[in-house]
Image (cartoon, helix red, strand yellow):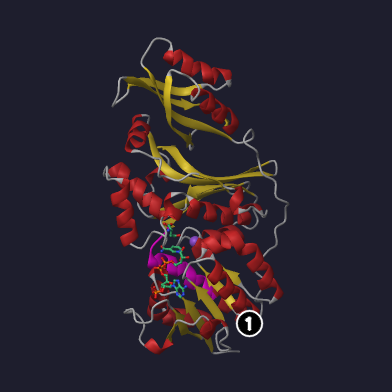
Amino acid sequence: MKQKIQIGLCGLGTVGSGVVRILQDHQEQIRYKLGCEVEVAKVLVKNKEKKREYIKDASILTMEASDITDNPDIDIVVEVMGGMEDTYQLMERSIRNRKHIVTANKDLMAEHGDKLFALSQEYDTDIYYEASVAGGIPILRSLSDGLASDKIEKVMGIVNGTTNFILTKMTDENLSFETVLKEAQALGFAEADPTSDVEGLDAARKMTLLANLAFKMPVAYSDVQVAGITSVSQEDIEFAGKLGYIVKLIGIAAIDDGKVEVSVEPTLLPEAHPLAQVKNEFNAVYVYGHAVGETMFYGPGAGGLPTATAVVSDLMEVIKNIRLGVSGKAYVQPQYKTALKDNTEKHAKYFIRVEAEDQTGAFHAVTNVFAGQDVSFAKILQLPHSKSKTAEVVMVTHKHSKQQIENSIQQLEQLSVVKRVISCYRVDGED
Ligand SMILES: NC(=O)C1=CN([C@@H]2O[C@H](COP(=O)(O)OP(=O)(O)OC[C@H]3O[C@@H](n4cnc5c(N)ncnc54)[C@H](OP(=O)(O)O)[C@@H]3O)[C@@H](O)[C@H]2O)C=CC1
Ligand SMILES: N[C@@H](CC=O)C(=O)O
Ligand code: NA
């Protein structure tokens, strides 16, 4: 039985530095729980000359991936460098050399996880990826272990810290999108390319991983309907506030009669809803189980140390499996065939803003379009448009299919009295 487990750490940035810090600061507790030493034998970086705060022996730094993937002394590869193709090759080579993987790379796991899991099964190795979803919140472990006995019906939440940070500051401090995005990047929350955050792609990859785990069904990243927050304006936030709502980027994965829908989009939540009160880079995930009912998981979704706690906890799990001789046994194959809802089977309430001519019959023409699609309203108000001589009609519909709403929007845009459909966002968290 090995008394020292050697780690190859790929990446020493926001998360990688956090991993080194936790392994140093918590070494005694980790050694006690595992019954062995854990040593970072090699660290892969892009630029060896960069100053490193937590590395005592610079000789462990390398710019050659093969110093890790082909190193016979390294048992576990911790991948916290991001990237896709090159990183996939690195992980593939490591698995073929019978090394276990711990990763925070939700892009890679959402798009290529099926291939990596198949390979890890072939070589009896583990792949753990808790840090990929909701940062430090142990949501994947809760779904696969804590709620293993239940039938999960819905997973809904805030799973991107950067966009939640932006929407919080836009709402509470009236700051601009651009200003707050820069602050999120400076704090290390955002992806290398923050488009992934603000266009909802990061959240969509995380919802893909959550849906696969929750519904035991292969759901592809391409199956997720995605909209980001770049279209959300201060006026949207203000109008939502007038109607008692807060705007959040919400991921939803739900299953009904064996069919699944997965989406990420700006969503209006009642101010009193717990998710509406999740601020800054924090994440929160509701999990609805058939037997357990409603559960909620809350914590930091981004940031070096919080994310690194998930990475190191996975590392400890892999080491426990090595010492128990059960490596490669954690992964469970999908149980059900993929079955997705179409737009006539997805139902929600919608918040819609329309700019129309301020003239007799315009309001009637607008509401007539919805009547034609059998869409009714829970709330509706008409105000003079803030910047022009037109009128603004703001509506919250009752629960209708996405198809009915899309048909209505399409017809509105054909009306001569409608200048433009300003915005259309889902409303959730209320009957
Ligand atoms: N930041 C966060 O809050 C969270 C991040 N993640 C995920 O964790 C991963 C890392 O994120 P983060 O730490 O923020 O990223 P950073 O950009 O802060 O760090 C990336 C690290 O990887 C190294 N690196 C990048 N590309 C290469 C390469 N081709 N070869 C060698 N080294 C490379 C960099 O080297 P060098 O230091 O020399 O530049 C750097 O040390 C990503 O997959 C991200 O999605 C997941 C959850 C939360
Ligand atoms: N950029 C991501 C980092 C964690 O996954 C986020 O903002 O949530
Ligand atoms: Na997590």
Q: Quadrant of residue 118?
A: bottom right
Characterize the magenta stretch by its predominant secondary structure: helix
Q: Nearer the viewer, residue 253 or 201?
A: 201
Q: Is residue 287 visible?
A: yes
Q: Position of residue 68 (x, y in %)?
A: 53, 83
Q: Quadrant of residue 388?
A: top left
Identify the residue shown where x is 52% and y is 81%: 34
Q: Nearer the viewer, residue 322 or 373?
A: 373
Q: Position of residue 384 (x, y in %)?
A: 31, 20
Residue 310 lies in the magenta stretch: yes
Q: Nearer the viewer, residue 150 or 345?
A: 345
Determine whether 248 is above or below 70 in the image.
Answer: above
Residue 227 lies in the magenta stretch: no
* Figure quadrant, ligand 2: bottom left
Q: Position of residue 15 (x, y in %)?
A: 41, 69
Determine whether 51 is above or below 116 in the image.
Answer: below
Identify the residue shown where x is 56% and y is 89%: 73
Q: Quadrant of residue 334?
A: bottom right
Magenta segment = 301-316
Query: Where, quadrant-wise, is the N terminus in this rendering?
Result: bottom right
Q: Amino acid at mark 1?
A: Asn
Q: Which residue is mark 1?
A: 97
Determine whether 43 is above or below 157 in the image.
Answer: below
Q: Is residue 303 left or right of residue 91?
A: left
Secondary structure of the residue carrying numbered label 1: loop
Q: Nearer the viewer, residue 1 or 371?
A: 371
Q: Is residue 35 visible?
A: no
